């Protein structure tokens, strides 16, 4: 009996010990679980704050865990419960590529794309690494950064660049065409006029012989002028950088006025010249500055089309102005083209230098004249200003740095 008693005590003790051990185990298990939960919470929090798509694949390449961004971006739901395979989310096309990369254990930047539930491709940069857990489970951890924004930006940038190149080309073509048109109109008109005169004079050729000869000589002269314009425009069109030299604005103006002589006479325009003979040379290129003066004078002539007593005033001289580069007040060579024509409305005064802005009838003006003028003057570190009151005329003042001062600045 004594044997049974001690036996049952021992048994009780054993039960007690086992019970205690069980409790210990439960406590330890619970603690562990809390730790695991806390750890899981922590990783969940990190994963959900990631703006990248995070997903974990098992050995069969099925998604076992993923963050919110992943589900959101690929339009799946974590609650769906249906197993998602890599093949589904990478699309057939990329599946082999990603699988191949995974087989190497680790990869850093794989540019590929993922598929949304609806089949839309999302360009991503994929990073991956594979590891084996203590229990021997193989897991693949993948992080995908959405490249859509970047791609949209790149597409937009390249589109914008294409447009720029296109408009640049268009503008250059337009500039050339407009320039040629502008400058050739006068000699072509003269040729037409004198040819018509010749035809008329041919009704009585013997009597009109000297007149015919005179007209034909003028025609030859205008053709030569047109040829020289084309030659100079060719130089203007070619982008080969010409050297900057000292240019005499007075000479340029006088040359152009000679060239426009018959047009001024024809339009009954009175010319008032106030050229300062002592004005210094400006640093620029003759052909381009000729273009500037020609455009401004032609605009002035056009503006006086309906003026009763048209007067074209051209002045040169020295004037103080603000250097657009240094913002210092300096002396400039002034060239002013003044007309008493229709003037320019205050509202459009700011727009007249914009490319393609014109108030002329469709087909007569391309609206490039003043934008070319502005471009050239800026190129030579100058400025152009306009003062105008509608109905009484306009004054365009071109200020260019004198040649000697530019030399000093460059230490020549
Ligand atoms: P376009 O002569 O082909 O119209 P411009 O760039 O030379 O192109 O001129 C743009 C516009 O500026 C003209 O359409 C005209 O309205 C205005 N403009 C230019 N010069 C004068 C001027 N001297 N008087 C009045 N308006 C002018």
Image (spheres, rainbow, N blue to C red):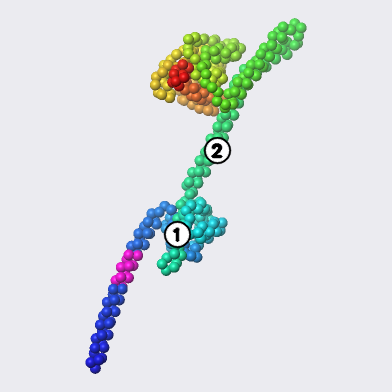
Q: Position of residue 127 (x, y in %)?
A: 46, 55
**Front residue of 98 and 393:** 98
Q: Which residues are magenta?
A: 26-36
Closer-to-camera residue (26/119): 26
Q: Residues within 10 Å of mark 1 (few under 14, many from 20)?
A: some
Q: Which mark is residue 141?
A: 1
Residue at horizontal 32%, vertical 70%? 29
**Tag 2 residue:** 162
Q: Residue furthest bottom?
A: 1
Judge depth for marks 2 and 1 and give the one in front. Answer: 1
For numbered disc 2, what is the local secondary structure?
helix
Sequence order check, earlier mark of 2 and 1: 1
Q: Residue at x 24, y 88 (%)?
A: 6
Q: Overall secondary structure of the magenta stretch?
A: helix
Q: From where the camera sits, is residue 342 visible?
A: no
Confirm whether the magenta stretch covers residue 106. Answer: no
């Amino acid at each position: 009996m004594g044997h049974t008693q001690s036996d049952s005590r021992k048994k009780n003790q054993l039960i007690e010990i086992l019970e205690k051990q069980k409790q210990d185990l439960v406590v330890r298990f619970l603690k562990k679980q809390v730790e695991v939960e806390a750890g899981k919470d922590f990783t969940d929090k990190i994963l959900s704050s990631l703006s990248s798509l995070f997903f974990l694949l098992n050995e069969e390449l099925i998604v076992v865990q993923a963050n919110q961004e992943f589900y959101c971006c690929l339009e799946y739901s974590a609650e769906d419960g249906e197993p998602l395979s890599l093949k589904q989310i990478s699309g057939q096309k990329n599946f082999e590529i990603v699988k191949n990369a995974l087989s190497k254990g680790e990869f850093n930047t794989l540019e590929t794309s993922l598929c949304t539930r609806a089949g839309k491709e999302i360009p991503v940069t994929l990073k991956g690494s594979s590891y084996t857990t203590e229990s021997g489970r193989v897991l693949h951890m993948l992080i995908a950064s959405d490249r859509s924004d970047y791609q949209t930006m790149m597409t937009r940038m390249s589109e914008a660049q294409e447009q720029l190149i296109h408009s640049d080309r268009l503008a250059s073509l337009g500039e050339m065409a407009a320039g040629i048109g502008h400058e050739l109109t006068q000699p072509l008109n003269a040729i037409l006029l004198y040819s018509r005169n010749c035809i008329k004079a041919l009704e009585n050729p013997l009597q009109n012989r000297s007149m015919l000869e005179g007209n034909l000589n003028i025609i030859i002269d205008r053709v030569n002028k047109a040829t020289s314009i084309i030659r100079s425009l060719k130089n203007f069109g070619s982008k080969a950088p010409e050297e900057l030299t000292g240019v005499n604005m007075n000479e340029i103006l006088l040359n152009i006025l000679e060239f426009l002589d018959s047009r001024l006479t024809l339009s009954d325009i009175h010319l008032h010249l106030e050229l300062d003979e002592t004005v210094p040379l400006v640093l620029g290129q003759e052909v381009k500055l000729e273009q500037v003066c020609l455009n401004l004078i032609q605009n002035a002539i056009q503006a006086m089309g309906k003026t009763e007593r048209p007067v074209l005033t051209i002045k040169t001289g020295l004037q103080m102005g603000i250097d657009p580069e240094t913002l210092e007040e300096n002396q400039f060579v002034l060239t002013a083209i003044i007309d008493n024509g229709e003037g320019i409305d205050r509202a459009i005064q700011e727009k007249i230098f914009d490319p393609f802005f014109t108030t002329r009838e469709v087909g007569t003006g391309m609206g490039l004249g003043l934008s070319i003028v502005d471009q050239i003057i800026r190129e030579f570190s100058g400025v152009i200003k306009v003062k105008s009151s509608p109905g009484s005329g306009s004054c365009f003042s071109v200020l260019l740095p004198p040649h000697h001062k530019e030399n000093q600045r460059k230490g020549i």
